[in-house]
Amino acid sequence: MKTDQLYKLIWMSRPLMQAAEARVEHGLAGTDLTVRMRAVLEVLRAHGDMTVPDIATKLEIQRQYVQLMVNETLASGFTEQRPNPRHKRSALLSLTDKGTAVIDTAIAREMEILRGIGAGFADDEVATALQVVERVTARLKQVGAAE
Amino acid sequence: MKTDQLYKLIWMSRPLMQAAEARVEHGLAGTDLTVRMRAVLEVLRAHGDMTVPDIATKLEIQRQYVQLMVNETLASGFTEQRPNPRHKRSALLSLTDKGTAVIDTAIAREMEILRGIGAGFADDEVATALQVVERVTARLKQVGAAE
DNA sequence: TCATAATGACAACTATATTGTCAATTAAGA
DNA sequence: TCTTAATTGACAATATAGTTGTCATTATGA
């Protein structure tokens, strides 16, 4: 294995992330959505109604901070609280129609850009890349956890 | 092109980066090196002597902040200033023997871990992944810059 | 030489969190 | 049922990783 290729791959993650985030932020300008609200809505969109602690687990950030993000989405009317049959105090967070519309629109626009970018790639190239990145990430986490 | 594969690939960049950074940080524990000092030393190691503004360009962060990072490496004796033939005020930053030793050791240790991780991959898989990630990043930046 | 730009130093500010603490509530076991 | 341990939401304090603005001091280049 050419280790330096792997090294480069790993450290490309930062520029990639920054470029992607800049894109998202740019696309959100003019919307009532902020990047962090978007993160909450995206999780709800992908996984359905969830509690704040569950969203925090998905996003891998502290629940206290997710609480702030969630409160913003509530204040903006993108989400609403629904009674949680499994827990009386921790409500389920649910997308409102408005929230669904706004996140769908945002993601659709992002997907449009992605289609443009993806045009230059073969399916299997991207599939391989995804697979490698996922496995590398898993193994990096593993090594860290072991010690 | 399966756009959702590309979508996933892009957003794997965050977990990948976090896992990698956690690894680096962990590896640096017990050393006199901090993560941000490491970044400076790594650039110097890879590109030879540079000025503060040049390092900033490489790292894509503000020169004023790089100045702080660099000052730490100077204070710790990992780097030293050398006269810059091309510019009298902006000294070239150079690794000291101590700095070279410490960054070499750190990177060697990281490479060791990488070799372990890389063992499970074929050369061409990683090469493809790197290529895809680099091209995607470039195109993301391009789209952003166009508007 | 002289206008223009770059540099280093430093202070103020911002964004994005993390950490600690608390009271209220809930879940789980004896 | 009691009661103990854990979870939750709220909020304040702190931390981290920078950015931005400003200034005096050089350098550079026409």
Image (cartoon, coloured by chain):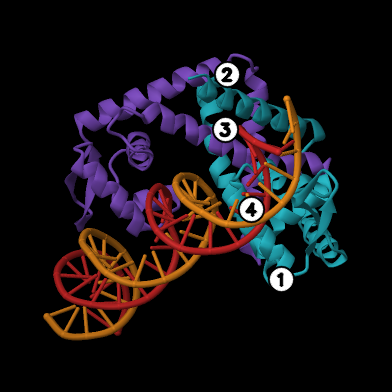
Chain colours: A purple, B cyan, C red, D orange
Residue at left offset 60%, top offset 45%: B61
Mark 4 or 2: the one toward you: 4
Q: Earlier in the sequence, mark 3 or mark 4?
A: 3
The alpha-carbon separation of the residues under discs 1 and 3 comes to 35 Å
- Chain containing the residue with disc 2: A
Report which residue position mark 2 lands on: A118
Report which residue position mark 4 lands on: B66
Residue at left offset 66%, top offset 50%: A139
Mark 4 and mark 2 on one chain: no
- Mark 2: secondary structure: helix
Task: Please name the amino acid that badge 4 sits on.
Answer: Val
- Chain containing the residue with disc 1: B
Q: Is residue B4 above or below residue D1?
A: above
Estimate how packed mark 4 is, as few (under 14), some (14 to 19) or many (20 or more) residues with alpha carbons within 10 Å. Answer: many
The answer to whether B14 appears left or right of D3 in the picture is right
Report which residue position mark 1 lands on: B32
Mark 1 or 3: the one toward you: 1
Mark count: 4
Q: Quadrant of residue B58?
A: top right
The alpha-carbon separation of the residues under discs 4 and 2 comes to 35 Å
Report which residue position mark 3 lands on: B9
Task: Please name the amino acid that badge 3 sits on.
Answer: Leu
